[in-house]
Amino acid sequence: MNEGELATRLGLPGIPAAAEALMVARDVRLAQLTGGHVHFAHVSTAEALDLIRRAKAEGVRVSCDTAPPYFDLNETAVGEWRTYAKLSPPLRTEADRQAVVAALADGTIDAIASDHQPQDTDAKRLPFTQAEPGGAGLETLLAVTLGLVHGGALTLKAALALLTVRPASLLGIEAGRLAPGKPADLVLFDPDRAWQVREEALVGARNTPFDGRPVQGRVLGTWKAGRRVFG
């Protein structure tokens, strides 16, 4: 749980935003000293993003990603001890969520990851402090990201790049793009098809923080190296 008023009212121990910023500041400094490249996964706070933005402007070899919960949800999704919204890092304030959206738009954030960390039912249906953090993120990755497009924060091209070619470039692999002679890894989707996330309808792990969330964007088919594997 994010440290703050809500955590206090729920009687839960909180993780402060400063914890993330302190680790980012330390590792940015190490990258400056060594000339090495540091990548920060699942950045969730405005303060950490400011540090990363500043480091990039100074030429430090820094990159980062975030995940859909951190640009689509905030700490209020925990509601009354809702363990499906217990994630690591925790869901943050609305101001932090808006900062993540702004960092996606200005290029500070290099990629969007699914943060697919599903837990079994027994690990989630426990008191909040005892439940395991994490949630299913794979099946909702595209639709929730497209919310940024429908809301005007990103263009469709920019949103898809954050899911495909930009993370592939970070990893130094030839993927995420269409080119002659390259593997035909394809996804066919309808960006406007509306549906509602329901845990019982998910194919894989079901403990999603987006349960009940209306979304737009439905995958119709997936091909791996030219072979249809879904749809």
Image (cartoon, helix red, strand yellow):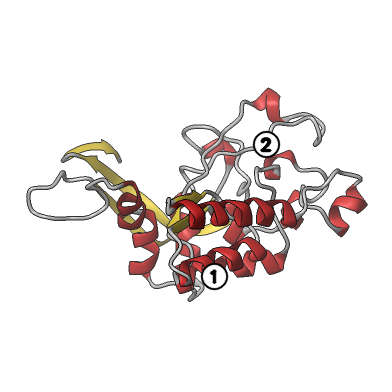
Q: Residue furthest bottom?
A: 152
* Residue corresponding to mark 1: 54
Which sits in the foreground, 93 or 136? Answer: 93
Q: Which numbered disc covers residue 70?
A: none
Front residue of this view, candidates 210 and 153? 153
Q: Residue at x 54, y 63 (%)?
A: 52
- Check the image and report above or below for 184 versus 156: above
Q: In the displayed orientation, state which residue is furthest to the front.
A: 33
Q: Is residue 46 above or below residue 64?
A: below
Quadrant housing the C terminus: top left
Horizontal arrangement in the rendering, residue 8 relative to residue 205 (left or right): right
Sort mark 2 into few (<14), some (14-19) or many (20+) by Cα contacts within 10 Å: many
**Disc 2 to disc 1, how far (Cα)?**
30 Å
Q: Residue at x 81, y 35 (%)?
A: 129
Identify the residue under disc 2: 133
Q: Residue at x 46, y 55 (%)?
A: 112
Q: Nearer the viewer, mark 2 or mark 1?
A: 1
